[in-house]
Amino acid sequence: MSIRPIVTLGDPRLRLVGERVTRFDKELGRLLDDMVDTMRDAPGVGLAAQQIGLALQLFVIEVEGQVHELANPRILHLDGEDTDFEGCLSIPGFFAERSRAGFAVVEGQNRRGRAVRVSGGGVLARAIQHEFDHLQGELYVDRLPPGTELVTVDRLREESTDGEEDLARSA
């Protein structure tokens, strides 16, 4: 297992649409282990393959101590609305208020190719949508309403008594 460099805004690999994962073998397992280690080291709550320069339909999320690994995900259901600060490991140091569904259900495959379904609200719902967007070559800033301000980490800490919780939401 190793920490991989995270691709940042401006690198064209972030804009690549991921190809389907077709091989569920030890190599995929090592890649997923590296992705989890990289995400934790950053630290963040999610990481998509594009963020380490690979055009694959593959992401990892860790929320409330539970790791979710999804290959070839499909969002099955979105419900409600939640507006909160959102950040991205590929746009380090900045956050913006972003509206997303408050509840999400996604289906995909695990490291062995078996079908898995993940559902939840709050940070998990936001992370599912955020990482799924990465697999389509999209970043969270792409769909911000006109006039939405990017806020620095330092400013967010100064203005928010919940700053530490918000900062933990980088994906």
Image (cartoon, rainbow, N blue to C red):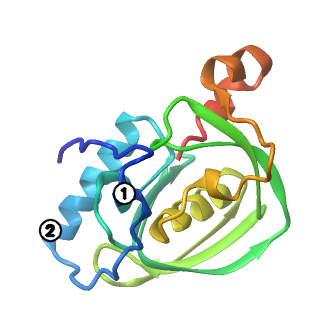
> Which image quadrant for residue 5?
top left
Name the mark on residue 113: none
Q: Measured along the vertical axis of the image, is residue 49 above or below residue 157?
A: below
In the picture, measured across the screen, residue 74 lies left or right of residue 85, that is left
Residue visible at 34% across and 79% down in the picture:
19
Q: Give, as a three-letter code, the residue at label 1.
A: Pro
Answer few, some or many: residues within 10 Å of disc 1's Cα (few below 14, many 20 plus, some between 14 and 19).
Answer: few
The residue wearing badge 1 is: 12
Q: Nearer the viewer, mark 1 or mark 2?
A: 1
Name the mark on residue 27: 2
Q: Nearer the viewer, residue 34 or 8?
A: 8
Q: Secondary structure at mark 1?
A: helix
Residue visible at 29% across and 56% down in the picture:
53
Name the N-terminal-most of marks 1 and 2.
1
Q: Nearer the viewer, residue 143 or 62?
A: 143
> Which image quadrant for residue 14?
bottom left
Q: At which x and y percent is residue 134? A: 49, 62
Q: Secondary structure at mark 2?
A: helix
